[in-house]
Amino acid sequence: MPLKTRKFDTKVQHLKYKVLREVARYAFEDKLDRAALEIPSQIVSGKEATMRCCIYKERAIVGERIRMAFGGDKENPNVIEVLDIACDECPVGGYEVTDSCRGCIAHRCEDVCPVGAISFDKHQKAHIDKEKCVNCGKCAGVCPYSAIANRKRPCEAACKVGAIGKDEQQFAHIDNSKCISCGACVYQCPFGAIMDKSYLLEVIDLIRGSQQNTKYKLYAVVAPSISSQFSYAKLGQVISAIKALGFYKVVEAALGADMVAMAESKELMEKGFLTTSCCPAFVTYVRKNFPELLEHVSHNLSPMAAISQRIKEADPEAKVVFIGPCTAKKLEVRQERVRPYVDSVLTFEELQALIDSRNIDPSELAEEKLDNASYYGRIFARSCGVTDAVREAIREQGASEFHIDPVTCDGIEQCHKALLRASKGRLQNNFIEGMACIGGCIGGAGCLTHDPRNKEQVDKFGREAERTISEATQAMEEELF
């Protein structure tokens, strides 16, 4: 029976899914040695190109995606890579005067230009001298007709940390010294020329190696943002599908969030000033750009690592796979501090591919209950959620005399502003919630969809919880182990 059509935001995501699904299928069938040869022709099966100039280029791009599904370039420490053959070498024009220029006589653009790069033709239409222009954007800011546009590449525009440029051949290039692995460029590139490395085959090896959980138990730790994904099935059915893949138990990362909220509230009250540590892209940004503030980053593990640590303390032979929306988590699990607790990572995109590779239809399964965490642990998935949880943890500890004065940063640009003020001693707040993705984890690059209603779904999932933070953490031992 054919599986229902899956919903994705773009055709780029759909192509990525198809490649991952087929690679997973070949892995389960022990045919990986034939994957690179056979899968491109299966995905690009017709005689007419549908996406690029010819079917041969389309198949070559699929081949590069297969390489990424196999783990990508082992010599490149970054989890984000550019697929040169897929890059369209988008024109980079910088600031340009468009046809919207009315030839006005105010000439504000000329007055504001610091390098004298603006001139006018006989019709008073503005022109920019590219040899002089420094791309400051002041002319665009003052034009009353918005007639000056910044012709940025989509990937470059998406990268708010300035990590994307171009190489000698005009292909997109990632500066690993600046990149925080948030994946914004992966999601925004219209040609799918940037992709995150996949650990899909690593997870399949863990599934098969467990020998149906007799050799070791395989745990799936799922991010609370899962409640906003897989709209074609109920959450309980998706949990059943994960177990049908071969996982012994599915545990909420939100329970780890409850643990972190309690620990961070204590750390905040002790230190007086703190930033969150749950977003690995944010922590990487602090490390690379504001190292002087690292001592103020919470010393607690992320929710993913915290609950995984507890699982392995209770069952030292266990293996743990984190499933969530985040590409930066793939970098976090390679860190020395986290590596002992989390064995691999899947995004929601990869989970969908894995489920479908086994012909599992979640919508036809019975619902499996998932009820580990509190409301506050679950809303870690969206912006302001961590702040709300830490505030509640302070209240539950009876420390009402302590006043939390937070600044919630929705996206890395807001994070930069708060960190800059803090580095100069000008930040009045005592708590920074740093989320690299707009909207929080629900805006992660590994999500299947980025629907504006995802926040509502996370809040709804949170309201279904019946426990306080304290109750959730206290019940953990009895219910999980």
Image (spheres, rainbow, N blue to C red):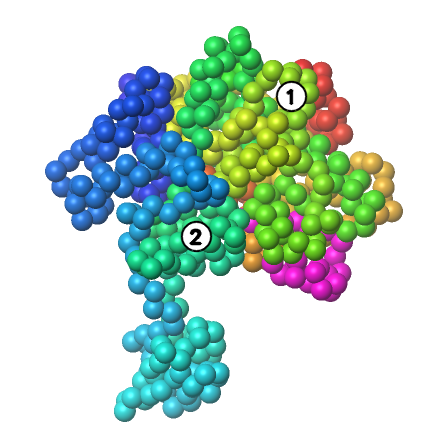
Q: Is residue 227 above or below residue 430?
A: above
The Cα–Cα distance between marks 2 and 1, rounded to whole angstroms, is 36 Å
Q: From the image, which quarter does the N terminus lie in?
A: top left
Badge 2 crowding class, 10 Å Cα cut-off, few under 14, some 14 to 19, many 20 or more, is: many
Q: Which residue is mark 2?
A: 174
Mark 1: which secondary structure? helix
**Residue 428 sits inside the magenta stretch:** yes
Q: Is residue 374 visible?
A: yes
Q: Nearer the viewer, residue 53 or 108?
A: 53
Q: Is residue 66 above or below residue 438?
A: above
- Nearest the camera: 364 or 141? 141
Badge 2 vs badge 1, beta-carbon distance below 8 Å = no
The image quadrant where one finds the C terminus is top right
Q: Is residue 119 magenta?
A: no
Single out the residue that lies furthest toward the top. Answer: 214
Residue bearing the label numbered 1: 312
- State the residue at coordinates (43%, 56%): 164
Location of residue 69 (image quadrant): top left
Give how far across and how far down residue 400 sits, in percent. Answer: 85, 44
